Image: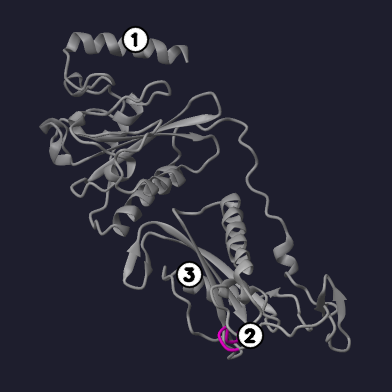
Amino acid sequence: MLTTPQRWDKYLAEQAAQWSERCLYERPRISDRYGTVINSNLYVVPGNVYGPKAVKKMVTSALSMWGRARNGYTYSTHCGRSCSYVQMIQARVDRIGCAISTCSNLRHRTKSYGYASILVCFYSPGQSLLSSFPFTRGSACSRCARGMECRERLCHRPGTELVPRDMLKIERGPAPLAVAQDRLSSSEIYSLNDAHNKMRRGNKINNGLAWDSYLERWSKWIINCSIDYPGPRHTYTNFERLEQGKDVYHVVYAWSIEEFNTRLRMAHGCRTPGDKERCNHFTNILQPFLTSMACAAHDCGDGTRQLVCLYDNEADRPARYRPTSGRRRSFYSPPPDEMRRSPQDTRYSGVRRERQWRRSYRERRDRG
């Protein structure tokens, strides 16, 4: 039996990337740069996959699932229900390239799904999985060509690199943070705003959310690691606790998994105007009439970071706080009493009580 190891091909990887970016769960009928037919394997997971750990987990899961199909395979010219496994063991295939893309709307035939990540692997040279044997039965390496050597039960050509040397260099991630992150950086603000708008566009909501200084002032005022305080009565609020060092925009993509299930039990959930309806993080972001957003972060001192995001429509604000009003408060001034809500009671309970609450809140914040 002659079976050669598969080596990485960057051109196949580029083709796989181009196909995966289409966010289409279909096997293409294309050829490589030599005009040879390409075969493929596909794998999809819900949500958006980012970072080396998540990518490794996805690839491992894909290989495991494709490999499990071995249990239902019998040696024949037809792959049956084990085509993904048969594709991996094709004797003629000696080149492989893979890519992963994240999709806001993954399509499969006439159906479309929400946020997902797709892994595409291309194999060359391809051959029919429905009319040919994947290999010739016999002893391992029994038909190796002259000049080849048998290693790990495969026929190797001496000097052939299975993986290019430049890909074997381990890219180390950023060094651990010497100081825990507290407030949002300018790049984090940009990525948060961009992630929100991509999610809305992916769900056919064309009006984007603009980052707003009025809501940013509010979010910085209410953020607290102990209690999830909501924003003004007319706003939608999302809360989340994340580990230090984790990119904040990953949280937004994780919220997409909640979809429209508003009965989830969440440690840090959401609030709606007047708490009149049930919500989750995803449904808050997809409110079609929203125009503005802002978020704030705070170091909780235990290796975690609190995140709060506020959303509103500028037309719902009190007149003097709308963009057309000339009486805009300064960025660092405290929020107006008449709009403040307590975490336990959404009804306005009087200026005196609110001032007492504000004083006690400052004392707690100063104590850490």
The number of numbered discs placed on residues in the rendered structure image is 3
Residue in front for this viewpoint, 111 or 198? 111
Residue flagged by tag 1: what amino acid is it?
Ser
Closer to the observer: label 1 or label 2?
2
Residue 194 coordinates in the image, percent (x, y)? 37, 51
State the CA–CA distance, disc 3 to disc 2: 20 Å
Q: Is residue 249 left or right of residue 156?
A: left
Q: Which residue is mark 3?
A: 20
Residue in front for this viewpoint, 26 or 342? 26
State the CA–CA distance, disc 1 to disc 2: 71 Å
Q: Which residue is mark 1?
A: 360
User: Does 137 lie within the magenta span?
Assistant: no
| Point 39% across, 31% down: residue | 268
Residue 319 coordinates in the image, percent (x, y)? 10, 33
Residue flagged by tag 2: what amino acid is it?
Pro
Residue 172 coordinates in the image, percent (x, y)? 68, 50
Residue flagged by tag 3: what amino acid is it?
Ser
Q: Callout 2: helix, strand or loop?
A: loop
| Point 61% across, 78% down: residue | 123
Residue 125 is labelled as: 2
